[in-house]
Amino acid sequence: MGNITWQPSYSVDVKIIDLQHQKLFSILNTLYDEIHGKSNDKASMPAVENALLDLKTYVAFHFAEEEKFFKKFQYEKAVEHIAQHHIYEEKINELHDRYSNGEQNMENEIIDFLDEWILNHINIADKQYTQCFHEHGLF
């Protein structure tokens, strides 16, 4: 996929979540740039590792924020959604650990995972909670 630009179609119509997703896209774009060596014509292991760490940290924060609202609003699909969060967090942790330990040629795997995540989680699963959040006054 490569760099992603925020589009209105990515919106879940909840400002705080949209802002977090935009921040997430920024981190993902940094990671894509580092993987493709945009900053210095080749991928820099420390730069990619740092971008993965930023992603890992921000994802933990973002998922916790969503899950706080799930609990507060008693979101009916919370269990399923949180299970997806755990899968994504585990995969990001695994990718970070493997990359940090010097595993080579992981760049395509990282990008493929992130592309799938954007297309399936943010664009599909996250939009399912919009109505619940709106019913509880969160816009």
Image: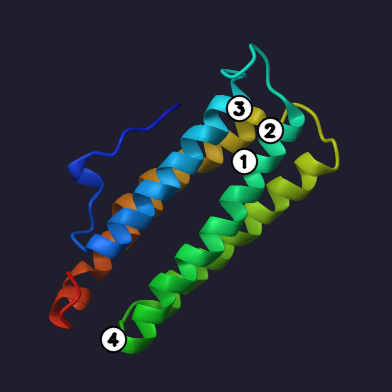
Of all residues, the one furthest to the right in this rendering is 101
Identify the residue under disc 2: 47
Above or below 131: residue 123: above
Q: Which mark is residue 34?
A: 3
Earlier-in-chain disc, 2 versus 3 = 3
Residue 84 visible in image: no
| Residue sitting at x 68%, y 22% | 43
Q: Which mark is residue 51?
A: 1
Q: Residues at badges 4 and 1 in contact (C-beta under 8 Å)?
A: no
- Residue 55 location, x and y as percent? 57, 49
Q: Residues at badges 1 and 3 in contact (C-beta under 8 Å)?
A: yes
Circle 2: residue type: Ala
Q: Residues at badges 2 and 3 in contact (C-beta under 8 Å)?
A: yes
| Residue sitting at x 61%, y 54% | 56
Circle 4: residue type: Phe
Q: Residues within 10 Å of mark 3 (few under 14, many from 20)?
A: many
Instruction: Work out whether residue 77 or residue 24 is closer to the camera in this orientation and state it.
Output: 24
Left/right placement of residue 130 relative to residue 75 reads left
Could you tell me which secondary element the residue under label 2 belongs to?
helix
